[in-house]
Image: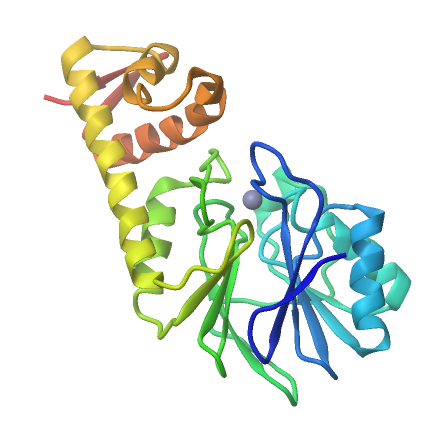
Amino acid sequence: MKTIRLSPVVRRITASNSNMFTGPGTNSYLLGDQEISIIDPGPALIDHIDDLISISGSYLKQIIITHTHPDHSPGASILKEKLGVPILGLTTESSLERDEPIDIDQEISHGDFIQTNEYTLEVIHTPGHASNHLCYLLKEENILFTGDHIMQGSTVVIAPPDGNMTEYLHSLNLLREYNISKIAPGHGELIHDPIKIIDATIEHRLGRERKVLEKLNKIGPSTIDELIIEVYDDVSAILHPIAKWSLEAHLIKLNENKKVAKNRQLYSVVE
Ligand SMILES: [Zn+2]
């Protein structure tokens, strides 16, 4: 087990579920010493859950989840069963349709505060990657826990219909209103220049959107399968099946903005 202390309040343990989607694995964050919260217990990996239990034990007060994707939240149910602590998170209709249901004990939403005697977390609703995605701002240290909203070292997948590109960009812009010193992502290392990364992520998405329009203009009405090769020509073809989700999310946004029309399977630029 490798526990890394990141600040006076925060420790991190990474689950051993490293793959194409999860980078080095899912980060679980432990906050506090006497009233411990775990943000994202990760997948249902017994070794990882045992590590979390051996560190927090009877000091564990609550489990907090960023969203209900399989690499972030299934461990919560096992922890809850073993230690009898509540799970805090957000349920949306669309997340219920898509994800394995999680037995959330306390529904939390945008603007809520989670308070202990040791630290305070502010809840920020950041839909886009997932409709029920929450970020948490540790007020004492201005560290923002971003789950899959912002990752270090890889691009976030936006998979419709629960994923939504318009909301994703809105949620990125929203973060600029907060005082953030560091970002603790669900995957990867601590990010020390939060505003730079937020702005770069927004610019990356807008750049991809411009490329969608540019390529559609060039090749005319096309299907997603035809368009992916053009728009993601800078990304390995192995990743195209995954990139298709984000491409569809871009096309849905452009369609809503009346810049792209959809006729059956064919997308074209609105003149
Ligand atoms: Zn996710």
Q: Where is 203 relative to 235, above or below? A: below
Q: Position of residue 181 (x, y in %)?
A: 39, 72
Q: Is residue 151 visible?
A: yes
Residue appearing at x 38%, y 32% in the figure: 249
Q: Which quadrant would residue 195 be assigned to in this image? A: bottom left
Instruction: Out of 103 and 185, give the one closest to the viewer.
Output: 185
Task: Describe the colour scheme in one phrase.
Answer: rainbow
**Is 220 placed left or right of 235 in the picture?**
left
Residue appearing at x 53%, y 50% in the figure: 188
Q: Where is 183 relative to 235, above or below? A: below
**Is 128 placed left or right of 57 in the picture?**
left
Q: Where is 167 relative to 259, above or below? A: below
Q: Which quadrant would residue 254 be assigned to in this image? A: top left
Q: Is residue 94 visible?
A: no
Residue sticking out furthest to the right: 82
Q: Position of residue 202 (x, y in %)?
A: 28, 48
Instruction: Out of 22 and 79, give the one closest to the viewer.
Output: 22
Q: Position of residue 163 (x, y in %)?
A: 47, 40
Q: Where is 152 relative to 143, above or below? A: above
**Is 3 placed left or right of 237 in the picture?**
right
Q: Quadrant of the N terminus?
A: bottom right
Residue appearing at x 47%, y 49% in the figure: 151
Q: Quadrant of the C terminus?
A: top left
**Is 118 placed left or right of 178 in the picture?**
right
Q: Position of residue 98 (x, y in %)?
A: 62, 37
Residue sticking out furthest to the left: 271
> Which quadrant of the figure shows ligand 1?
top right
Residue appearing at x 52%, y 54% in the figure: 133
